[in-house]
Amino acid sequence: MTLSGRHIVLVEDDEIMGGSIHQRLDLEGASVTWIKLMGRGLSAIRTPHRPVDAVVCDIRLPDGTGEELYEALCRTTTPPPFLFITGQGGIDQAVRLLRAGAPDYITKPFEMGGFLDRLTLILRPEESDDLPPQTGISAGAHRVDRLATEYAAGDHPVLIRGEKGLGKARLARRIHDLSDRRAARFAEISAHRDDRADPALVKALTTVGEGTLHINGLDGLSVASQDRLIQTLSEDAPFRVIASAWPAVDSCVAAGDLRADLLYLFKEHEIFIPPLAERTKDAVWLAKQFFESLNRHRDPPLKGLSSHAESAIRAHDWPGNGRELRARMLRAIRAAQGDWLFPSDIFPELGAQSDRFSTLSEARDAAERQQIIAALTRTDGHILEAAKLLKVSRTTLWEKMQKLGL
């Protein structure tokens, strides 16, 4: 794969490095938009003059960080592939970005050939179509797949709840493909609160025909869009609607951000996808699927995952779920020095921080996060019931979930 015709956004304030990268990408045939500030980068990526194929971004910027830029994009859309540039002192941030699903990072100084190889790799089309259709091999995954098959046979609205990176959109597409509507259109809109969500919904409602409309982020619909959707569904719409949302979507009703009648219309048929941290068997299984899919593009190919790597995968908490797992596997397969993948290939922070000891605050946050995830899993994502299990108020639980990114 070449870079010819690709649109790359370069976010780099250093004149020498930025100029060097810009010049080389030009020589490779890419179209480059060079931005020197985080704020301008945000608008250039959110509302580009043409689709963005990838972003090359320095982690340290004059008005913020590349991490802040990436997180801001994740809150309102699915960002394009990012290749982060960092110094040795920025490894902590780069690892956090891997956990959030960012495909790769490269440390200074680097050779331009290696940089181009990294960029080309993250531009490779997603290999998700090569993955098995099922969610996993655990009991929780089997329940998700059973409900997907069961709901595909009907026409009622479906709600898919789960954390980021669990493949909610992929599951919505699978339900469509298993249904009698498979020959009709599958339309998808992002319902995050911005100026484009309302017109996107209006257009989708009028063009989806007898197909399936997936609303990515039911809890992000504006009041006007919620009213319009309720009205459309009450008029016996010819299409089907599948919505996805965060596990604690019920709290949006309590906060007045989501109409209760709209949520309960979907909750009659809902699927809760347990986080990967609660499905260690699925984490290893999914890692092997990604390995087989990605390794075929490596020359020479690796032999496989070592048993030590499998153990490390089981022990990791996977805050970014499958998105993080794919990002780590993508980078590990590219960077591996031996014939097998080892823990340090998948978790570069093991080598970079081998002498670093977690603070009490970090340890406490990690323990609280794991316990909250366990409570939400046991209560099928109902925040009030989870709060009762944890013996805290619903408000306290919600605040902790916000703090811990749940």
Image (cartoon, grey):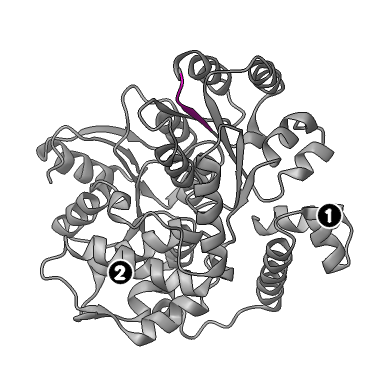
**Start-end of magenta stretch:** 210-214
- The residue drawn where x is 43% and y is 33% is 180
Viewer-nearest residue: 83 or 392: 392
Q: Is label 2 in a helix, a strand or a loop?
A: helix
Q: Residue 135 location, x and y as percent?
A: 46, 58
Q: Amino acid at mark 2?
A: Ala
- The residue drawn where x is 45% and y is 48% is 66
Mark pair 2, 1: CA separation: 40 Å
Q: Residues within 10 Å of mark 2 (few under 14, many from 20)?
A: many
- The residue drawn where x is 54% and y is 20% is 201
Q: Is label 1 in a helix, a strand or a loop?
A: helix
- Look at the image and tell me whether residue 87 can be seen: no
Of pointers 2 and 1, the one earlier in the residue sequence: 2
Q: Quadrant of residue 174?
A: top left
- The residue drawn where x is 79% and y is 61% is 386
Q: What is the quadrant of the C terminus in the image? A: bottom right
On the image, numbered disc 2 is attached to which residue? 332
176 part of magenta stretch: no
For this view, does 83 lie left or right of residue 181?
A: left
Identify whether 220 is placed above or below 375: above
On the image, numbered disc 1 is attached to which residue? 384
- Look at the image and tell me whether residue 22 can be seen: yes
Identify whether 165 is placed above or below 306: above
Q: Amino acid at mark 1?
A: Leu
Q: Residue 256 location, x and y as percent?
A: 82, 33
